[in-house]
């Protein structure tokens, strides 16, 4: 089920586009993004602005930045934050959801441990009943997905594959499928995983180049490179290592 229908960027509120985050090529030309899909992927090279947009949307939704957000750096004090120039169109509006930054999962787990020391472990209940730090990285991720994603809401995930083996990535896709088919959840995710972005019926937005544009799965570099590599890895390496 899609709740967030559209993201609109109000550039008229920004004085100049020469400082971060307004100077990122793909974001600079972004006026509107159609998010009326159960599953939306942001893909593209490193540094193309996927996390920047995800974080701004999560902040605009009012979701906490689990484990802390990035420290945004602005040259001018009067600059708005990226979230301040966004507006979100909802139908229906949901207030529950989750934002997960892969890099700060450990900090989040530690914060839960701290809270558990104060409440005798009650806080662990939605996370599988025990400390996320006592489970492996991948186990902790799946515990979170399995137990916390049970409410109707919007889930914003930055590189959920970071901890997951291929087998667990499929388990993760199964969880997504169950939630979105029941009309319980919408997912917006940044990913580099050719397995995860293959999710049927998803829309894929590429941040490569001068604008955010829709792309088919088979057209993605992730798919093409992985396929070429797996089809004939000797040939692939011959080219890769050639002078
Ligand atoms: N706090 C910051 N101050 C200045 N520039 C930043 C800041 N955070 C990120 N950037 C720059 O903004 C660009 C986009 O960063 P972002 O983290 O959104 O990329 P990304 O697409 O998520 O990349 P990745 O796939 O590596 O996670 C990068 O060029 C980065 O160097
Ligand atoms: Mg990122």
Image (tube, helix red, strand yellow):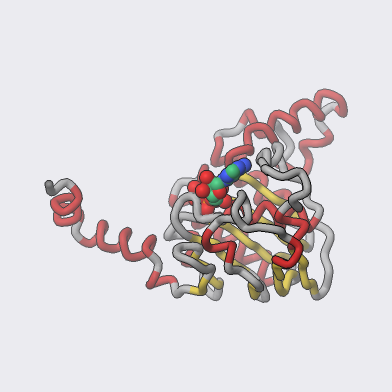
Q: Is residue 115 left or right of residue 213?
A: right
Residue at the image point whose x is 38% and y is 60% from the top? 222
Place residue 133 in its image quadrant: top right
Image location of residue 176, percent across then percent down: 62, 62
Residue 160 visible? The answer is no
- In the image, 212 versus 37, the foreground residue is 212
Residue at the image point whose x is 67% and y is 52% from the top? 55
Is 73 placed above or below 3 here? above
Is 9 placed above or below 67 here? below
Image location of residue 43, percent across then percent down: 50, 61
Q: Is residue 37 left or right of residue 129?
A: left
Image quadrant for the N terminus?
bottom right
Is 92 placed above or below 233 here? below
- In the image, 139 versus 240, the foreground residue is 240
Place residue 39 in its image quadrant: bottom right
- In the image, 85 versus 159, the foreground residue is 85
Count of number-bearing discs: 0
Image location of residue 118, percent across then percent down: 86, 25
Is 70 placed above or below 47 here? above
Q: Residue furthest top?
A: 117
Residue 180 visible? The answer is yes
Residue at the image point whose x is 67% and y is 45% from the top? 144
Image location of residue 155, percent across then percent down: 69, 58
Place residue 225 in its image quadrant: bottom left
Residue at the image point whose x is 63% and y is 28% from the top? 134
């Amino acid at each position: 089920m899609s709740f967030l229908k559209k993201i609109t960027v109000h550039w008229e509120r920004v004085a100049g586009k020469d400082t971060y985050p307004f100077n990122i090529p793909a974001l600079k030309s972004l006026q509107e993004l159609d998010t009326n899909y159960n599953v939306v992927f942001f893909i593209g090279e490193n540094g193309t602005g996927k996390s920047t947009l995800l974080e701004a949307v999560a902040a605009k939704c009012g979701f906490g930045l689990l484990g802390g957000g990035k420290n945004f750096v602005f040259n001018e004090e009067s600059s708005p934050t990226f979230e301040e120039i966004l507006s979100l169109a909802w139908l229906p509006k949901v207030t529950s959801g989750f934002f997960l930054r892969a890099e700060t999962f450990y900090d989040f787990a530690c914060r839960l441990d701290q809270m558990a020391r104060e409440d005798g472990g009650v806080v662990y209940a939605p996370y599988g009943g025990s400390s996320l730090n006592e489970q492996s990285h991948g186990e902790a991720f799946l515990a979170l997905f399995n137990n916390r994603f049970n409410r109707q809401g919007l889930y914003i995930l930055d590189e959920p594959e970071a901890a997951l083996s291929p087998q667990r990535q499929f388990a993760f896709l199964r969880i997504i499928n169950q939630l979105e088919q029941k009309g319980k959840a919408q997912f917006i995710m940044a990913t580099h995983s050719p397995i995860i972005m293959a999710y049927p019926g998803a829309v894929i937005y590429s941040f490569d180049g001068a604008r955010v544009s829709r792309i088919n799965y088979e057209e993605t570099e992730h798919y093409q490179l992985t396929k070429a590599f797996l089809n004939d890895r000797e040939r692939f390496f011959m080219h890769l290592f050639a002078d």
